Image (cartoon, rainbow, N blue to C red):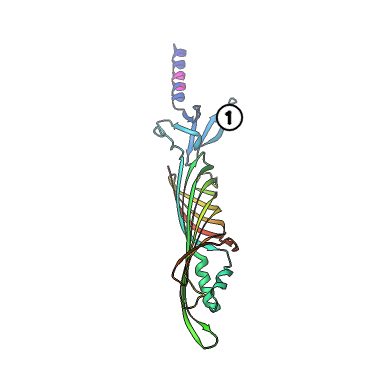
């Protein structure tokens, strides 16, 4: 009788121990019986008893887990957050064109070097805005579409000598602006920098089309200064690297640096001639313009 009572108590303890066991159910439908020791945004750490009686510590990535259960006396039943499938981002900052713009210097004769330097600084430096949408195959790679906008401009006012026979001067008032609209398919890559998945290093690569527009307006009696519009559509590429910090699994911020490559060739030229008639031409023999730039921006990203 005493042996039966002891056996009954041992069986009860064994059953309680079995019921107290945690378990992890993977996305493949497998069940891992274990003791869960820690749950973070990126991993679940757990312990398992080996055949020789030793306890082994292990962990599994959250994107491989469908749900997990912990012993009720330690924690209520929980379900892990599902992996996010979509990434939507917006960014804004500063862009710097790398061209020397020697053609602008040649087209504005008589301008002092100081005024010309200020004018070119305005043309080279402008605002950069962007947006992206990616579908994530897993935590490390995704594909989608990327859009960016860049605009810069400058204004110049200066007296210029237009006649060497008589000291005849004119006031040059020149305004000019660049516009770039870029859209392309994009490849997104991510590498986690810490175990808790709060920091990540990202890269995005895209190849698509840029729509370029150059507007200039010159107010002067001199024929050297005129109003014109340049338009062109060309192939362009963009590479961006970013450091991302996750405020929440669904929300993150980033610091970004990007390199944008484009060469503008054979633009359409629109201008008003001396008879006040609109002329439209294609500059087929003009040298291509290097419109590559560097972008520096901050980003906000949403995951769902």
Q: Residue at x 51, y 43 (%)?
A: 143
Name the image quarter holding the N terminus.
Answer: top left
Question: Does 134 sit above or below residue 54?
Answer: below
Q: Dot 1: within a 10 Å radius of its alpha carbon, few (fewer than 14), some, or many (20 or more) residues? A: few
As rendered, which of 99 and 221 lies closer to the eye? 221
Which residue is nearer to you in this view: 179 or 95? 179
Q: Position of residue 293 (x, y in %)?
A: 55, 60
Which SS type dominates the magenta stretch? helix
| Residue 177 visible within the image | no
Above/below status of 280 relative to 90: below
**Residue 174 lies in the magenta stretch:** no
Q: Position of residue 9 (x, y in %)?
A: 44, 19
| Residue under the point 55% across and 35% down | 58
State which region is magenta.
9-14
Residue that mark 1 sits on: 54
Q: Please, which residue is most extreme toward the front here? A: 275
């Amino acid at each position: 009788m005493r042996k039966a009572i002891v056996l009954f108590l041992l069986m009860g303890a064994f059953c309680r121990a079995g019921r107290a066991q945690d378990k992890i159910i993977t996305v493949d439908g497998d069940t891992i019986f274990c003791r869960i020791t820690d749950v973070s945004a990126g991993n679940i750490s757990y312990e398992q008893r080996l055949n020789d009686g030793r306890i082994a510590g292990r962990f599994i990535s959250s994107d491989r887990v469908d749900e997990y259960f912990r012993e009720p006396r330690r924690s209520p039943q929980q379900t892990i957050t599902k992996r996010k499938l979509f990434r939507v981002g917006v960014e804004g900052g500063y862009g710097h064109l790398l061209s020397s713009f020697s053609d602008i210097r040649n087209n504005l004769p008589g301008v002092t070097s100081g005024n010309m330097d200020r004018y070119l600084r305005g043309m080279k430096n402008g605002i950069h805005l962007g947006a992206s949408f990616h579908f994530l195959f897993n935590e490390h790679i995704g594909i989608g579409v990327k859009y960016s906008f860049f605009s810069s401009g400058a204004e110049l006012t200066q007296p210029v000598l237009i006649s060497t026979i008589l000291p005849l001067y004119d006031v040059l008032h020149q305004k000019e602006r660049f516009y770039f609209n870029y859209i392309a398919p994009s490849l997104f890559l991510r590498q986690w920098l810490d175990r808790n998945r709060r920091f990540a290093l990202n890269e995005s690569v895209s190849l698509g089309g840029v729509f370029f527009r150059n507007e200039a307006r010159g107010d002067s009696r001199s024929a050297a200064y005129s109003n014109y519009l340049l338009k062109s559509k060309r192939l362009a590429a963009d590479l961006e690297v970013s450091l991302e910090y996750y405020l929440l699994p669904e929300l993150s911020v980033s610091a970004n640096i990007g390199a944008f490559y484009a060469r503008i060739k054979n633009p359409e030229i629109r201008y008003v001639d001396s008879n006040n008639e609109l002329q439209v031409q294609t500059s087929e023999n003009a040298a291509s313009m290097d419109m590559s730039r560097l972008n520096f921006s901050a980003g906000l990203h949403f995951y769902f």
